Amino acid sequence: MLDALIIISFVIAGASIGFYSIELLPGSAMQQVTNVDGLRWVAASFTALISGLIGLSVQTNYRRIERNIREMPLDVLLTRAIGLVVGLLVANLMLAPVFLVPIPKDFIFIKPFLAVLGSVMFGFLGVTLADTHGRAFLRLINPNSVEALMVAEGTLRPAATKLLDTSCIIDGRIQNLLETGFVEGQILVPQFVLEELQQLADASNDRKRARGRRGLDILNQMKATYPDRIEIHPADYDEPMTVDAKLVRLASEINGTLLTNDFNLSKVATLQKVPVLSVNELAQAVRLSYLPGDSFEVKILKTGKEPSQGVGYLDDGTMVVVEESSDAIGREMQVVVTSALQTSAGRMIFARPQASVAA
């Protein structure tokens, strides 16, 4: 019903414009017309046809437009509306003197043409400026206004919205972080990230296919466990852009935080002043820090470079080189830290058996 109403409205509006637009024709042209009423109906029929085609296009796309408006953050919608109103107001103020200038009757159509053109130009300019500086304008009026709008909207929480990239989903540790409660706020998975996961899952390369399927499985589990927090965001861009570029742009537009394990992506996002959270950096930050003299238990798994050395690993993967332990392979033993070394490959701890230290 609504689809038909949209088309009918455009047809009626177009027919009315064509019917009454005859009045805008120059007087010299009107004098050559023998049947004015016939010309009116021809013009009305033509404009009705054009308007009907436009209405059909609008009817086809209005669902998508409506969805985009509903999903648009409230602060962006508000600033764009203000920018449009201000642009139209400026257009009317600047064009007012033009309408006071006397124009020959044959060129009377110039005034409405300038009114429409000026309104479109200044309205578009107002919306563009609102997109660029609208958030700063709201903060100038009230520093807490943007955050208050987000809370009132209900789709964004006081905590920054997180955007997941492909590497972070495949990694899987984000699922554990959600379970512990250390990650707050809404979690968005853009549609283009989901498409990239699907492409990996359908790849001919076995390794890529396994990574893609693992990412989809993890995403399904998180969506089932946290249906109110994990959302698939439909935003996409028509411009030819990489997935990483789309992520940075979307995070910037919604004032969100990018959650990724991609080192290069995090650097690019930081350069564009987009907040970034790295699970790898978090894992490094929460590793236990052992100082010389600290004692712990480790299982010796293999021999080291030196004949008397044994090698074990902590739960976080840190390598522990234990002196005088080559004969203890396969056994747990209490060791005392003698020194620690941070290398490009990770952290290494050097230790000695506690029994030998006590002796």
Image (cartoon, rainbow, N blue to C red):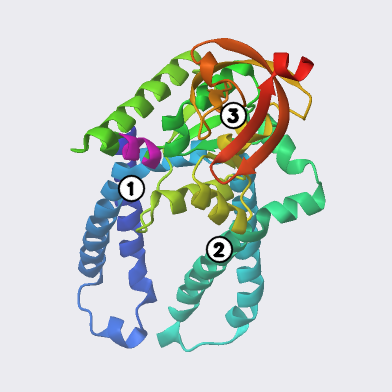
Please state the horizontal and vertical placement of residue 222, each as a whole percent of the image.
47, 20
Residue 47 is covered by the magenta coloring: no
Q: Which segment did they paint magenta?
A: 192-197
Q: How many marks?
A: 3
**x 53%, y 72%: residue:** 118
Question: What kind of residue is marked 1?
Answer: Val
Contact? badges 1 and 2 (CB < 8 Å): no
Please state the horizontal and vertical placement of residue 196, each as a whole percent of the image.
33, 40
Q: CA distance from mark 1 to mark 2?
A: 20 Å
Residue 287 visible from this viewpoint: no
Residue 191 visible from this viewpoint: yes
The one nearer the camera, 300 or 252, is 300
Q: CA distance from mark 2 to mark 3?
A: 69 Å
Which of the 4 image quadrants contains residue 356? top right
Q: CA distance from mark 3 to mark 1?
A: 70 Å
Secondary structure of residue under mark 3: strand
The one nearer the camera, 289 or 142, is 289
The one nearer the camera, 276 or 289, is 289
Q: Which mark is residue 321?
A: 3
Question: What kind of residue is marked 2?
Answer: Gly
Nearer-N-terminus badge (1/2): 1
- Mark 2 sits on what residue? 123
